Amino acid sequence: MAATKVFAARLAGLVVLGPDGESIGRVRDVVISIRYDRQQPRVLGLLVELPTRKRIFVPMLRVTAIEPGSANLNTGTVSLRRFEQRHGEMLALAQILDSKVRVEDPELPDVRDVDLFVVDLGIEQTRTRDWVVSRVAVRGHRRLTRRRTVHVVDWSAVRGLTQQELDLPGQSVTALLEQYEGLRPADVAHMLRELPKKRRIELAQALDDERLADVVQELPETDQLEVVKQLGVERAADVIEAMDPDDAADLLGELPTGEAEALLALMDPEESEPVRRLLEYSPYTAGGLMTPAPVVLTPAATVAEALARVRDPDLTPALASMVFVVRPPTATPTGRYLGCVHIQRLLREPPANLVGGIVDKDLACLLPETALTAVTRFFATYNLVCGPVVDTENHLLGAVTVDDVLDHLLPEDWREQDEEHPVAVHAESPGPAQAEGERQ
C-alpha cells in the first residue's frame, strides 16, 4: 500500500521506478523549501542518483506512490540535467539532520530550553497532492545518556531550523557518516563534491585521517586544495602523510613552494622523503606518475611469499599485478633491478619455488624522464597495467600504474563533467521551461 506519511531518512536508497517498472536510479536525498514564516516547509522533490552516479531532481508531483521498496513515478520523462541546489532549497538528509534545535511543546516540559538534535523529518501528502514537512524527530545529545529518547514533535514546535541558523558552522555529521559507511572512496568523493560548502567542510573535518586521505585522492585538484586549506596546517600534514606518495606529491605540487614545504616539514621524515623525491620530477613524466612503493622482493623470496605480498588489500589491482625483483636493499631506490614476475606466472608456480628463477628479464623499463605519451605507448605495446621505472644505474625507483596514466590523459576536469555514455534510463530531457516551472 502506498504511504502518504513517511520519514525522509526511510527514503534514502529506495529504487525509483518509472510507470513501466523500469529502474531510473535511487533516492539519495529529499529537497525541501524552508519558509521564512512558521508554515510547514514544502517538499519540492527527490534527489535521485542515476546508475552513472549523476544526480538529478525529480519533482514530488511526478511521484505517484511511495512503497516499502520503491518510489514510483507517473511518467518516464524526467529532466536528466545535473541537480544544482538553488537559494532557499535545503537537502533534508545532508543539511537538516544533526541540526541543533530547541522544542517548545507543552507536552514535553522536560526538554524545554534543552539542546536537541534532529534525527529525521516526517513528510506527508496533503489533499492537494503537495508534500510538506509536518513532523520532526529529535533527541538529546548522544553523550548524555545511553538510552536516548526520540521525540516526534510538530514542525511548529521546533526552533532553530531557519535558513540562517542552518548555515551556522559546527553542525554534527553523524547522519552523513552513516550514509557513507561502506562506500568506496571514489563514491564518497563524488558525494562530498555535491554537498554545500559548509557541510563539505564539516564532513571532511569529521573523517579520520586515513579515510579522508583516500577520499581526497579521488577529488579534482581544486577540491583537494579547498579541503586541505580548511583543515589547518597540522591536520592537513597528517592527511597528506596518509595519502599515497604520488598523490601527495601531485597535491603539494599545486601549492605555493612555501606552503608545500611547511607541510612536508610537519610530516614524518620517512613519509615525506619519497614525496620529496617525486616532487623533483615533472608531473607528466614516468617519474612524476610513479609510486615509490610497489611490491619489491629479492631473488631468494619464495613464490608463496610473493603471493602473500600481492594479497595485501591495501594494494590496488594494478600494483598487485606485478612483483619486482632486485638486489638488496628493497626500499626504493633499490639495489640492482633484476626484472619482474607477473602474477599469472606466480599462480602457475609451486609455492616453494624462488622468484629468482622465474624473473622476466626482457621487459623494457621506463626512465623517470620518459614522457607521458611514451609511457602510454609502453602500456599499450606490452599490454600492461603496471611498469617499472629505473634510473640510469639500473636501480628501481618505483612503478607506474595504468590508473595514474589515465588520470593524466583525461581532461583535468574529467571528474566534474557529466557522463556521456548511454545509461539504462527510459527518460527524456524536457525543455528548460518545463523543468524550471516544477521547482517554483
Image (cartoon, rainbow, N blue to C red):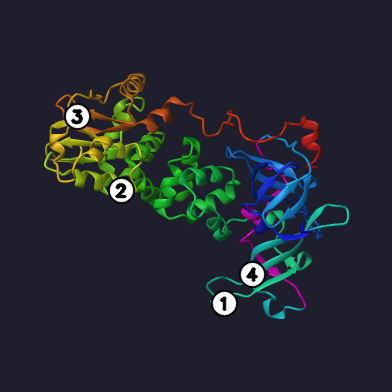
Marks 2, 1: nearer the viewer: 2
SS under mark 3 = loop
Q: CA distance from mark 2 to mark 1?
A: 40 Å
Residue 103: in magenta span: yes
Q: Nearer the viewer, mark 2 or mark 3?
A: 3
Q: Secondary structure at mark 4?
A: strand
**Structural distance between the alpha carbons of marks 4 and 2:** 44 Å
Image quarter where the C terminus lies is: top right
Residue 9, by quadrant, is bottom right
Vertical comparison of 118 with 45: above or below: below
Residue 58 in the image, given as x and y percentages of width and height: 72, 43
Q: Which mark is residue 312?
A: 2
Nearest the eye: 73 or 397: 73
Structural distance between the alpha carbons of marks 4 and 3: 65 Å
What residue sits 46% from the left and 50% below the top? 231
User: Which residue carries the number 1 mark?
Assistant: 147
Residue carrying label 3: 360
Which comes sooner in the sequence, label 2 or label 1? 1
Amino acid type, label 1: Arg
Does the rendering let one see residue 333? no
Q: Amino acid at mark 4?
A: Leu
